[in-house]
Amino acid sequence: MRKLTSEAVLFRNRGNRDSGKVSFIELFFDLIFVFAVTQLSHSFLENFTMKGAVQLGLITMAVWWVWIFTAWVINWLNPESLHVRVMLIVLMLLGLIMSTSIPEAFESSGLYFGLAYALFQVGRTAYTVWLLRKGLVELRINFIRILCWLSLSGAFWIAGGIAHESWRLALWIAALLIEYIAPSLGFWLPRIGKTPTAVWDIEGSHMAERCALFIIIALGESILVTGATFAKLEWNPVTLAAFGAAFAGTVAMWWIYFDVAAKTGHHFIAHSADPGRVARSAYTYTHLLLIAGIIMTAVGDELVLAHPTGHSDVKAAAVILGGTELFLLGNLLFMRIVAGVVPAPYLTGLLAFAILFPFAGAFSALLLSVISTVVLIAVSIWGSVFSERLCRLRPAPLNKQA
């Protein structure tokens, strides 16, 4: 009887009212990714080129993927269990090595990044397979499939870390393609086939809250960049205006996500007939666009604060407007998946930025930032009304096409 009880505590209690609650060890684990997001934005600022943008995109995809896969695992396992806590602490160490390696990932620290990433993904999954040895058979087979795919991609990550810089990018792109395609294929393997999404019977409220907390991490980086840059500047009307626009833009993004997308997503996934399918499409994939958009916006805010006047060049305009466009696109796709609608507020905002971009060179960085912020505020206000009406009219949806 004691043995059964010990095994039971390894798994999240789905019948408990607090089963979707995020634990303190999960919040502690997230601190590593606060550092990782900071490294991403600062690295791009130091290598503000097209090549740097490609590298930023690749590393951002890797950081998000390693975090979201861990969120899936902890959705099934009980984070209060000693076994799971030890796993998370070991993963924190690997994550710290990985994050520390980000600035030089395409130079001298490539092997450290690739090795830490591969060990993080493969080690976590292998340990989960071991923990599930007496658990649900279908779930264990699912993680065996995942382990095979991640072992394959892990070889590319390590090989890329060893290879010359020109080959490193190609090998790491191949690794990411393997990892990003795998969930959409149900982690298909010869003979044993693929995992149906019904097996991914997740705790929807927990997944929604975990992803929302990562959005907070990204928005926190935007606040830190704004505050740290502004603290070094002379206070005058121009810098104060840039500071105000950056802060208001961050608040608007928070409002758009938490008062519209997150609230709607939580409502719809809780009533979904297939929450695993919704979580795979809406949270696992589309949230990458949100994170990338916020990081780009943080970089744009620093550029505006440092050089608020004068005409914007193409790179600065692309970051200032492109970050908000990515963010709105991610929100639009998220709402399309969870609610089956294309929100007019997000679509209108995207069109506004698309129209503005060809003329961006005629504006100063500060004016572009102000216009971008005004659009985001308008979208947040309109989006709140849209979301409330949507949830009221469709109280219990069944998502079949996510």
Image (cartoon, rainbow, N blue to C red):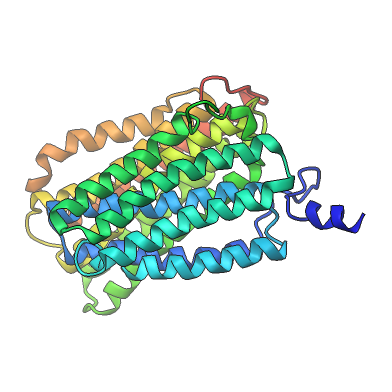
Q: Nearer the viewer, residue 341 or 385?
A: 341
Q: Residue at image x 24%, y 61%?
A: 162
Instruction: Give the x, y percent position of residue 294.
Output: 35, 52
Res 137 quadrant in image = top right
Instruction: Give the x, y percent position of residue 269.
Output: 61, 33
Q: Is residue 117 among the parts visible in the rendering?
A: yes
Q: Quadrant of the N terminus?
A: bottom right
Q: Residue at image x 33%, y 30%?
A: 348
Q: Residue at image x 39%, y 42%?
A: 179
Residue 136 located left or right of residue 172: right
Q: Nearer the viewer, residue 375 or 402?
A: 402
Residue 292 located left or right of residue 190: left
Q: Where is 155 relative to 40, above or below?
A: above
Res 397 quadrant in image = top right
Instruction: Give the x, y percent position of residue 383.
Output: 46, 36
Q: Nearer the viewer, residue 82 or 21?
A: 82
User: Going by the picture, which residue comes out furthest to the right?
Assistant: 1
Q: Where is 171 relative to 187, above or below?
A: below
Q: Is residue 368 among the parts visible in the rendering?
A: no
Instruction: Give the x, y percent position of residue 121.
Output: 46, 53
Q: Where is 387 relative to 303, above or below?
A: above
Q: Nearer the viewer, residue 166 or 296?
A: 166
User: Going by the picture, which residue comes out furthest to the front?
Assistant: 191
Res 182 quadrant in image = top left
Total number of numbered discs in the rendering: 0
Residue 19 located left or right of residue 55: right
